[in-house]
């Protein structure tokens, strides 16, 4: 009880130092728990979660080839892959064990603006005779077509999404920018023209969309041609192409559709196998296999990766910095305690009991700090991760116990250091200011004894002298009486 009472009294007496130790311990474990949660979430996202993705593979021109597909040169359509070519590569799915291949098919054509309908202008527009039109009509045959859209995924801001089984033949989606320029609302109608003839087609706005992916370079306000601006894209139900007879067996010029086929796969292992199989079949020159869905998934992890990179450094800094600060605070707590140790030993307190007192002075503020910081880190890791990692949760997992143990080990090491402080103290020292401790006291006692002895001898000599004088006086008196 003596040890605990003295330790608590010291902690209360030096409250600011104790509060600092509590805060440093709490911040250290809070930070390392959160950093470990972020690291675990990143490892899982790039490992287990990545492996179970359902990627859609596409075969498209690489960046160099895409630059040669000029929007104002009708001969560029000859470089498009035909539907039959895509069918050839679909056969490779069977080679990798896909028994029932699934596809997402997209078709695009340029379309002319007509009458009051105006597209958003490009930076260097050409006439529709050269470009085929100022807008682009896209049609996908299922909802997964959004995932392979070369201009990015989008969401419905107003109205409804497309009905891929619809029979109307007029329903389309327009962008917010296009709708604003042409004063279109959900339910409004407008016309677009055939890229090769004077025919026009009346379309109906079923919904208004906005993109959720960033714009590829050269396909937004920086587009050279109006039809290359993704905000001029009109997304249509499949029946729009069919009813308006925009597809034919022998298309001419800009009526040659640009196909975009997505191969639906199960898992990244199957995707990698498909890539190898397609390459073995010799891809068309300038074409490559990629996966927009995997690219989008990896892009979504960039905030988490960035946070993980920062927190990895923070974790190292917290261990090192927290340990050093706590050590400095401990050194401050143990300095100038020699007289206290000496006094305790003089009154009979053993060195080990003093050591336990010093250890408790270290543990009393730091253990609550570890508990508070650890609990706070565990409870806030998920919401804090969502806020800092682009919405990706970073929950506490079993791996987070390791930094907790490391933090506890640091605190225990400090307590051990504090315990050994009195064990290595010298013998009890008093009168330090006079410079001698126990030796000085012993010397002082010897000096006093010697002085006392000297004084005693002097007194004895004085008494002897006085007695001699008295004897002489008595003898003189006797002589005088005898003479008389």
Image (cartoon, grey):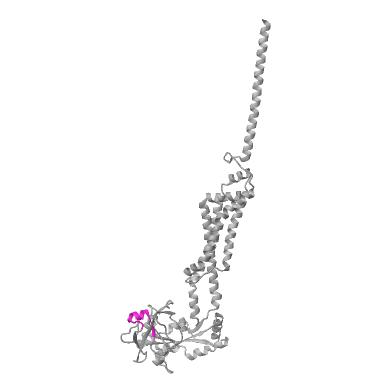
Q: Position of residue 130 (x, y in %)?
A: 36, 87
For this orientation, the residue located farthest to the right is: 482
Residue 185 drawn in magenta: yes
Q: Range of the magenta residues?
A: 172-186
Q: Is residue 413 visible?
A: yes
Q: In the rendered view of the protein, which quadrant contains the C terminus?
A: top right
Above or below residue 364? Residue 467 is: above
Location of residue 219 in the rendering, given as x and y in whole percent from the top left corner: 40, 80
The percent position of residue 293, horizontal first and vertical second, equals 49, 80
Q: Quadrant of residue 201?
A: bottom left
On screen, residue 361 above or below 377: above
Task: State the image coordinates of residue 261 (x, y, percent, origin top left).
Answer: 48, 86
Can residue 312 be seen by looking at this rendering?
Answer: no
Left of 456 or right of it: where is 142?
Answer: left
Residue 204 in the magenta stretch? The answer is no
Question: How many dots with numbers?
Answer: 0
Q: Which image quarter: residue 473?
A: top right
* 242 relative to 371, above or below: below
Image side of residue 413 versus residue 196, left or right: right
Which residue is at 60% across, 57% downward?
Answer: 412
Q: Residue furthest left?
A: 116
Towards the viewer: 292 or 65 = 292
Residue most toward the top? Answer: 484
Of the pair 121 and 371, the residue shown nearer to us: 371
Q: Residue furthest bottom?
A: 250
Relative side of 265 to 451, left or right? left
**Can you say whether 397 is above or below 201 in the image?**
above
């Amino acid at each position: 009880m003596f040890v605990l009472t003295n330790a608590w009294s010291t902690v209360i007496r030096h409250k600011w130092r104790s509060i600092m130790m509590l805060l440093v311990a709490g911040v250290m474990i809070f930070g390392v728990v959160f950093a470990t949660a972020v690291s675990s979430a990143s490892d899982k996202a790039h490992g287990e979660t990545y492996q179970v993705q359902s990627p859609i593979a596409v075969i498209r021109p690489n960046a160099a080839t895409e630059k040669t597909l000029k929007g104002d040169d009708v001969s560029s359509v000859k470089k498009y892959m035909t539907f039959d070519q895509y069918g050839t590569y679909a056969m490779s799915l069977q080679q990798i064990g896909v028994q029932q291949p699934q596809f997402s098919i997209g078709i695009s054509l340029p379309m002319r603006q007509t009458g009051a309908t105006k597209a958003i202008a490009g930076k260097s527009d050409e006439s529709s005779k050269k470009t085929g039109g100022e807008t682009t009509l896209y049609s996908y045959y299922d909802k997964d077509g959004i995932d392979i859209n070369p201009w990015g995924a989008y969401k419905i801001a107003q109205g409804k999404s497309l009905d891929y089984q619809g029979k109307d033949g007029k329903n389309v989606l327009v962008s917010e920018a296009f709708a604003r320029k042409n004063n279109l609302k959900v339910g409004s109608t407008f016309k677009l023209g055939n890229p090769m003839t004077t025919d026009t087609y009346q379309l109906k706005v079923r919904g208004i969309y906005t993109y959720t992916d960033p714009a590829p370079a050269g396909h937004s306000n920086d587009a050279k041609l109006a039809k290359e601006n993704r905000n001029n894209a009109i997304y249509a139900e499949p029946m729009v192409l069919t009813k308006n007879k925009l597809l034919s067996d022998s298309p001419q010029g800009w009526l040659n559709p640009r196909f975009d086929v997505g191969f639906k796969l199960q898992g990244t292992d199957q995707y990698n196998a498909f890539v190898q199989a397609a390459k073995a079949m010799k891809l068309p020159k300038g074409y490559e296999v990629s996966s927009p869905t995997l690219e989008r998934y990896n892009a979504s992890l960039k905030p988490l990766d960035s946070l993980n990179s920062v927190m990895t450094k923070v974790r190292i800094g917290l261990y090192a910095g927290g340990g050093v600060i706590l050590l400095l605070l401990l050194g401050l707590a143990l300095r100038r305690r020699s007289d206290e140790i000496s006094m305790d030993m003089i009154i009979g307190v053993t060195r080990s009991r003093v050591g336990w007192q010093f250890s408790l002075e270290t543990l009393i503020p730091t253990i609550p700090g570890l508990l508070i910081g650890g609990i706070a880190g565990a409870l806030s890791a998920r919401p804090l991760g969502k806020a800092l990692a682009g919405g990706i949760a970073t929950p506490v997992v079993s791996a987070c116990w390791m930094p907790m143990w490391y933090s506890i080990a640091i605190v225990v090491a400090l307590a051990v250091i504090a315990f050994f402080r009195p064990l290595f103290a010298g013998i009890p020292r008093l009168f330090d200011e006079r410079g001698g401790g126990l030796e000085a006291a012993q010397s002082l006692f010897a000096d006093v004894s010697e002085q006392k002895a000297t004084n005693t001898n002097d007194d004895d000599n004085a008494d002897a002298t006085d007695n001699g004088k008295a004897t002489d006086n008595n003898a003189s008196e006797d002589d005088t009486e005898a003479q008389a």
